Image (spheres, grey):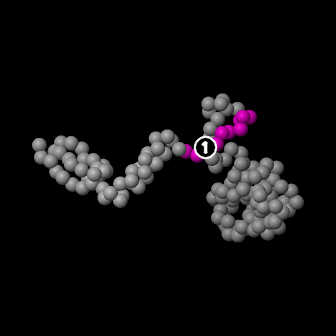
């Protein structure tokens, strides 16, 4: 059998090559940092570190099925801009603009107090990940607004 030597370890005819160099071939200064980084990546991959959140107990799910991925919509309502009343359900997870052209949306942020902020040139046809509690009639030029919770 013929052996081939490379910085990535020794391979023999008919065997698979190693994907990573053997630790003895790495410069000593790189050994520990590479090993630590590789270990952290493998732990994250094999333990399935996906951000999840426990769903509320009143969602009709069993306890075993009560985890869901963050930032998914579960309810949507059309919004009528109003300068004096907050949304019936607040805060939003997303705001969807369903018209053909860019527009302006004046809002009060979920944690922003009483100050209204106008978001200009908001792209249509996009789920914007913003948390708001009110859509203001003043300075809002968007006509089809959907709040997603």
Q: Number of numbered discs present?
A: 1
Q: Determine whether, in the image, residue 15 is placed left or right of residue 42.
A: left
User: What is the secondary structure assignment of the residue under circle 1?
Assistant: strand
Res 140 visible? no
Res 75 visible? yes
Q: Determine whether, in the image, residue 62 is placed left or right of residue 78.
A: left
Q: Residue at x 70, y 70 (%)?
A: 120
Q: Residue furthest left?
A: 1
Residue 57 position by quadrant: top right
In front of the other: 148 or 115: 115
Decide whether residue 7 is among the magenta residues. no
For mark 1, does the 10 Å Cα neighbourhood hold few (<14), some (14 to 19), or many (20 or more) residues? few
Q: Residue at x 72, y 56 (%)?
A: 131
Q: Determine whether, in the image, residue 120 is placed left or right of residue 52.
A: right
Q: Residue furthest front?
A: 28
In front of the other: 6 or 62: 6
x and y, in percent, of residue 111 in the image: 77, 58
x and y, in percent, of residue 149 in the image: 71, 48
Q: Which residues are magenta?
A: 50-59
Residue 85 position by quadrant: bottom right
x and y, in percent, of residue 59 in the image: 71, 35
Q: Main secondary structure of the magenta part?
A: loop
In front of the other: 83 or 69: 69
Q: Residue furthest right?
A: 84
The quadrant of the rendering that contains the N terminus is top left
In front of the other: 38 or 135: 38
Is 40 above or below relative to 27? above
Q: Residue at x 73, y 52 (%)?
A: 92
Q: Residue at x 64, y 64 (%)?
A: 123
x and y, in percent, of residue 73 in the image: 66, 47
Residue topped by disc 1 = 52
């Amino acid at each position: 059998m013929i052996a081939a030597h490379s910085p990535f370890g020794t391979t023999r005819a008919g065997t698979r090559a190693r994907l990573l160099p053997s630790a003895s071939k790495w410069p000593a200064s790189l050994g520990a940092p590479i090993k630590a980084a590789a270990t952290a990546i493998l732990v994250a991959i094999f333990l399935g570190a996906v951000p999840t959140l426990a769903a509320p107990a009143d969602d009709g799910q069993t306890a075993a099925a009560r985890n869901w991925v963050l930032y998914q919509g579960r309810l949507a309502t059309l919004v009528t801009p109003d300068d004096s009343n907050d949304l019936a359900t607040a805060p939003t997870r997303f705001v969807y603009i369903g018209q053909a052209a860019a527009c302006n949306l004046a809002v009060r942020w979920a944690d922003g107090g009483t100050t209204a902020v106008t978001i200009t040139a908001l792209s249509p046809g996009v789920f914007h990940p913003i948390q708001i509690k009110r859509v203001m009639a003043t300075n809002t030029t968007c006509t089809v607004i959907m709040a997603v919770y």
